[in-house]
Amino acid sequence: METLIGRLAKRALDAGGAALRSAINSQRVWEPQIASYERADRKHPPPRGAIVFTGSSTIRLWRTLARDMAPLPVINRGFGGAHLAHVTAFADRIVMPYAPAAVVLYCGDNDLGAWTGKRPDSIVNDLTQFVSRVQGALPDARIYVISIKPSRLRRQQWPAQEAANRGIADLTRSLPRVDYVDVATPMLGAAAQPPRDLFTLDGLHLSRAGYALWTSVLRPVLMRDLAGLVPAGRPLGRPRTIQDRPLS
């Protein structure tokens, strides 16, 4: 028989879990980062008609993005441990103002983290909201959705991430001007988990080799569809590969 103390302890745990889930899912924590982008934009307005990269920290930490995607013009607007719903909530402030020709989105692995209460179908629903918000404001813009990456740190989440990726791929096939970019398959290959050298020491964020792999997958897709964004006379170059990564 459950004791009174046991019931009270369970109630306290449930309340604490609900509070933690609310805090993790809240967008308010990212307000300072979004405001800092807006201040930077006022000082140095980015070009209109470029490609906006947005999403979670994997995008924010892509410090070689401009070089990797050159000569395509890009704007990096990734932030922290963002969830898809957060990116949608801030799209009016960090996507639409630039009137981009295309939006590249990476998000989702934080959504499936502990205590979020979210499932793969939640990610698909939130992605639907993001696409609707962007296409409602920018009907001519293309949207590229990068698959959720497998990581060594979150190996236990891979079944849920795979399910989410299947749902994302199915959704993008049904939507105009929306493409799915699969980075998970080349990251894994035939292995049960991706190689260590694709990640920094935390086993979650990408290393130079990881970003080089992403570049080799994503840049040709963008060049195929968006080469018209390259100024006349600029050489198209080639995608950076893992072998091309700097040694220092």
Image: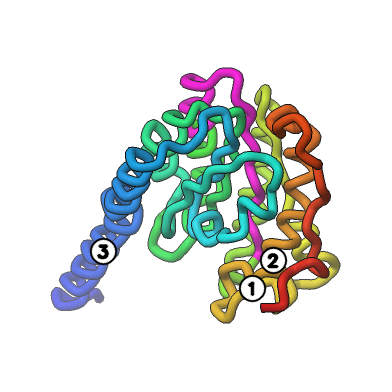
Magenta-drawn stretch contains 140:
yes
Percent across and percent down for residue 8 are: 16, 71
- Considering only order in the chain, which callout, 1 or 2, is on the residue closer to the N terminus? 1
Mark 2 touches mark 1? (CB < 8 Å): yes
For residue 133, which numbered disc appears in the image?
A: none
Task: Choose between 95 and 185: the one closer to the eye.
Answer: 95
Location of mark 1 (residue) = 199
Task: Choose between 85 and 198: the one closer to the eye.
Answer: 198
Percent across and percent down for residue 72 are: 68, 40
Query: Residue 160: in sight, yes or no?
Result: yes
What range is drawn magenta here?
Answer: 130-150
Location of mark 2 (residue) = 210
Q: Amino acid at mark 2?
A: Gly
* Label 2, residues with CA under 10 Å away: few <14, some 14-19, many ≥20: many
Quadrant that contains the C terminus: bottom right
* Label 1, residues with CA under 10 Å away: few <14, some 14-19, many ≥20: many
Q: Amino acid at mark 1?
A: Phe
- Left or right of 109, for residue 118: left
As helix, strand or loop, the secondary structure at mark 3 comes to: helix
Question: Toward which corner of the image does residue 144 lie, by quadrant?
Answer: top right
Q: Residue furthest bottom?
A: 201
Quadrant that contains the N terminus: bottom left
Percent across and percent down for residue 104 are: 60, 41
Location of mark 3 (residue) = 14
- Left or right of 85, for residue 42: left
Separation of marks 2 and 1 at Cα, in angstroms: 6 Å
Q: Is residue 53 above or below residue 172?
A: below
